[in-house]
Image (cartoon, grey):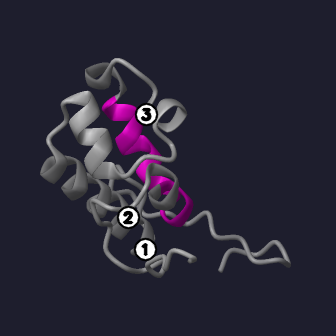
Amino acid sequence: MAEIMPDKGGPISPDMTVLDVVSRHRQTETVFKKYEEQAGACICCEALFEPLKAVAEKYGLDLEQVLTELESAASDERGGRNHAGEKNDAHIAVDGKKG
């Protein structure tokens, strides 16, 4: 039976894998990198196929805080801003003009 995946604009849930989150919201990779030192491992390397709730438990991370930061990064991305809150105007049309 195929797993039904939330749409790209949907909320990030504890049952989503690291891969699900990063593939839908590229900007969230910076959040995972932020937690590497605390986890003692590269989360995107070592836990790519694990659900977020399992990752938080395995590495001793605060799941609610991680989810909040991931949602923030994803919403910044949807709103045309990078994780630092700067406007992302790197959208170049096929013809080479900014869109």
Pick the residue in front: 76 or 49. Answer: 49
**Mark carried by residue 74:** 2
Q: Residue at x 85, y 78 (%)?
A: 95
Counting the numbered discs, the total is 3
If you read the primary sequence from the N terminus, does the residue marked by circle 3 or circle 2 appear first?
3
Magenta highlight: main SS: helix
**Residue 42 among those drawn in magenta:** no
**Mark carried by residue 78:** 1
Pick the residue in front: 72 or 5. Answer: 5
**Which range of residues does the magenta coloring cover?**
22-35
Q: In the rendered image of this protein, does residue 83 appear above or below residue 37?
A: below
Q: Secondary structure at mark 3?
A: helix
Marks 1,2: beta carbons within 8 A: yes
Name, please, the residue furthest toward the right: 95
If you read the primary sequence from the N terminus, does the residue marked by circle 3 or circle 1 appear first?
3
Pick the residue in front: 90 or 53. Answer: 53
Marks 3,2: beta carbons within 8 A: no
Image x and y of residue 51, in percent: 37, 52
* 65 with respect to 85 (left or right): left
Question: Which residue has dot 3 on it?
Answer: 43
- Amino acid type indicated by mark 1: Arg
- Separation of marks 3 and 1 at Cα, in angstroms: 23 Å
